[in-house]
Amino acid sequence: MQTEEQAPLRVAVHSRYALVRVGLSALVGAHPRRAVVVDLSEGDRQAGHVDVVLFDLAGLDTAEDRADLEHLLGLDLPVVGLARERRRCLSDAARALGVRAVVEEEVSSEHLLTALEGAAGRGTPTEGRPHPAGLTDRELSVLHLVVSGLNNEQIAQELFLSINTVKTYVRTTYKRIGVTSRSQAVVWGLQHGLVPRRGQRHGPEGCGRAGVATGELSATSIG
């Protein structure tokens, strides 16, 4: 929560949709003593005037939005993602890239501001709970997709990572959780509360370019 000495949090809103930008800006600006919306459209020289970015994840499966997100993260700006219904795989991709927190599209103004403040180092981060076995956010995202039956190539497509990067995450994840095979990783994930994503949809209302059959689990090796 903001103290009397702190200036309002400076929040840049990024969305390819004008209506979403207006709505998010209204939510952020509902408490002007805590947060104000600033413009990031003029490029890098504005980055120093931004404390945190609120990024609409709906377009993350496009090259343009992905490049924008990677650029912002490359500037070491904390980013909070806005998740969309039935596009949860984009939330995993955003976390894998380094987004600090993700909020749902029905988020209240208070919850949104709390998430933004946490990501910017003010107050308590909203996603600061430790993961089992000390897994990082990226490793947990990869493991969740392993449990859901995706092979390495499909995970790479879902999270917008290279196949070699995925293999590295799979290996480090196996080491952390003490398993040596994909089937053991699936069992471990199920025992620790990871719910397989059944009947995952792709295309206009889904994500990625690889399909997963309902209930299908893969035993593909990491090689």
Image (cartoon, rainbow, N blue to C red):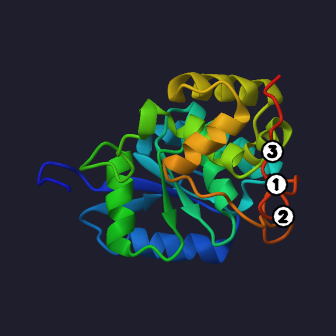
Q: Amino acid at mark 1?
A: Gly
- Viewer-side residue, 108 vs 207: 207
Marks 3, 2: nearer the viewer: 3
User: Residue 155 placed where, x, y %?
Assistant: 77, 42
- Alpha-carbon neighbours of circle 1 within 10 Å: few (<14), some, or many (≥20)? many
Q: Earlier in the sequence, mark 2 or mark 1?
A: 2
Q: Mark 1 = which residue?
A: 208
Outermost residue to the left: 4
Mark 2 falls on what kind of element? loop
Res. 42 in view? no
Q: Mark 2 = which residue?
A: 202
Disc marking residue 218: 3
Q: In which quadrant of the rendered view does residue 21 lie?
A: bottom right
Marks counted in the figure total: 3
Between the C-alphas of marks 1 and 3, the distance is 18 Å
Q: Amino acid at mark 3?
A: Ser
User: Residue 127 placed where, x, y %?
Assistant: 39, 50
The residue drawn where x is 55% and y is 52% is: 194
* Residue 58, above or below 96: below
Mark 3 falls on what kind of element? loop
